[in-house]
Amino acid sequence: MRNRIILIILSVGAGFLLVKYCTFKTEDSSSLENSTNLIQQQILNVGKLVVTEGHFSEVLTYKDKDEYLGGIVSFDKKALLVVNAEVTVSFDLKQIKYDIDEKNKTVTIVNIPKEEIKISPDIKFYDVTQSKLNPFTGDDYNKISIRAKASIAKKIDKSSIKTNAKNRLISELSKMLIVTNSLGWTLIYKGNTISTDTDLKL
């Protein structure tokens, strides 16, 4: 009888431990799944277009000539150009690639797309001089547009607009950093663990 009571107690104890173990595993698995879902949702929330806008101006002179008889006779045309350009620098965050490792609780940023630069020039002509034998044509306007965009592009490179755009990108990615940290996960980029905004060197 005594042995039977001991056997019953051991069976109940084993059953209790088994139930606790299964409950722990279920809660642990459920917690991991919830964390993964939250991170994936945050990736979707961050996945939007980040745009930085700027305005640039430039004054250019365009000249062209048609020569005949070995340069003895020429017909010139020229114009003073004032270029006002609206510029946008953007990052499409939907193109950022992530790798989520549930086992090690890491989110790795695999790839960040290069910025997209859009230049929309408004060109006004002043002091236009042209000959009936060498008038301004559509080809001239195409050349002027290409030259204007190239000139504005040089100004963009010397300005802070790209840096400002990257700072805004980092600000968006930091939202991911906050979520991963709060859930006990780790954010990784270029093989380095990202702990603060300053670690995100693009």
Image: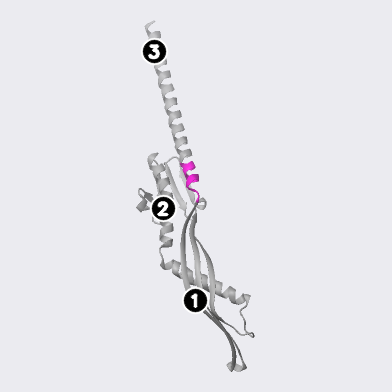
Residue 6 appears in view: yes
**Upstream in sequence: badge 3 or badge 1:** 3
Check disc 3 and give the amino acid type. Answer: Ile
Q: Which residue is mark 3?
A: 9
Corner quadrant of residue 178:
top left
Please, what secondary structure does the residue beneath circle 3 have?
helix
**Upstream in sequence: badge 3 or badge 2:** 3
Where does the image place residue 165, in percent across and percent down from the top left?
44, 58
Corner quadrant of residue 155:
bottom left
Q: Which residues are magenta?
A: 39-48
State yes or no: residue 25 in magenta.
Answer: no
Spatial CA distance of label 1 from label 2 is 36 Å
Q: 10 Å neighbourhood of mark 3: few (<14), some, or many (≥20)?
A: few
Above or below, comparing residue 40 to residue 130 in the picture? above
Spatial CA distance of label 3 from label 2 is 60 Å
**Which numbered disc covers residue 60?**
1
| Depth order, front residue of 42/137 | 137
User: What residue lies at 50% left-to-right and 73% top-to-bottom?
Assistant: 82
Q: Which residue is mark 2?
A: 170
Above or below, comparing residue 187 to residue 16 in the picture? below
Check disc 1 and give the amino acid type. Answer: Leu
Check disc 2 and give the amino acid type. Answer: Ile
User: What residue lies at 49% left-to-right and 60% top-to-bottom?
Assistant: 88
State yes or no: residue 43 in magenta.
Answer: yes
Q: Nearer the viewer, mark 1 or mark 2?
A: 1
| Depth order, front residue of 198/24 | 198
Residue 189 appears in view: no
Task: Say which quadrant the N terminus sits in.
Answer: top left
